[in-house]
Amino acid sequence: MDYLTLQRSAASLSGGEAQRIRLATQIGSRLMGVLYVLDEPSIGLHPRDNSRLLNTLRGLRDLGNSVLVVEHDSETIRTADWVIDLGPLAGEHGGRIVAQGTVEDILASPESLTGGYLSGRLKVDIPRDRRNGNGKHLSIFGARQNNLKNIDVRIPLGKFVCITGVSGSGKSTLMVEILYKALARDLNGATPSPAITTASQDWNTWIRSSI
């Protein structure tokens, strides 16, 4: 995570970033015979950066440690030496071992939903039709904080909008430090204010007409 600077406070880091910093600390300690348990370490990671995380986990294993990972990421599952698949569904319909073994064992299991999606027997269909939205949009001008460099953003409303980019590109800062804080300020009078140099002239009009 070479994009982080010493000026960043720990509170400004995402959960995934904080966990990966702890992982890097453990790699540097060169401990052996340790059991590591991680809960979804790939959270917030762009696919480009996933290989770095997996290399770190393999490095911990190769030092002579055991690494247990709760994860949904397909690349992480395929990298694992042993997979334990719980289910078959959630809540009262879960809590059983559906399949366990190598990745090949999971792929071949007819009872495993995980194996079904990994093997391609099951899939999530891409929508054929896209929503037109409600014709309104949210504009943010001059947003700069952490890695954001004075950017302007136009977000259409009434649509499913995805904010993406490699790790450290500013996604969480834009959504949490800028957008959320601006809404909290204008709707509830919350402080502190977001790091926006100029807001759109119809900002308050948009908020009032959209709630």
Image (cartoon, grey):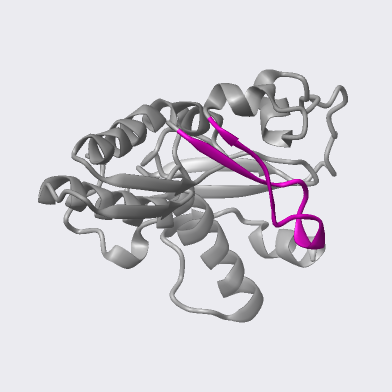
Please tell me whether residue 95 belongs to the stretch shown in magenta.
yes
Q: Quadrant of residue 105?
A: top right
| Residue at 27 percent of width and 38 percent of height | 61
Q: In the rendered view, would you say 148 is above or below 95?
A: above
Residue 68 x/y as whole percent: 41, 48
Q: Is residue 29 above or below residue 121?
A: below
Q: Residue furthest top?
A: 120
Up-down: is 183 above or below 61? below
Dividing the picture into quarters, in which one does residue 92 lie? Answer: bottom right
- The residue drawn where x is 41% and y is 44% is 170
Q: Viewer-proximal residue, 67 or 170? A: 67
Give percent across and percent down for residue 29.
11, 51
Q: Is residue 18 left or right of residue 76?
A: left
Q: Is residue 58 magenta?
A: no
Could you tell me which residue is drawn at 74 percent across and 41 percent down?
Answer: 160
Q: Can you see residue 145? A: no
Question: What segment is highlighted magenta in the picture?
Answer: 82-101
Q: Residue at x 35, y 42 (%)?
A: 149
Between 182 and 127, the one lying in front of the other is 127
Q: Is residue 159 left or right of residue 35?
A: right
Task: Please tell me which residue lies in front, 196 or 167.
Answer: 167
Give the position of the N terminus as an image quadrant. top left
Residue extending farthest to the right is: 129
Q: Is residue 78 left or right of residue 106?
A: left
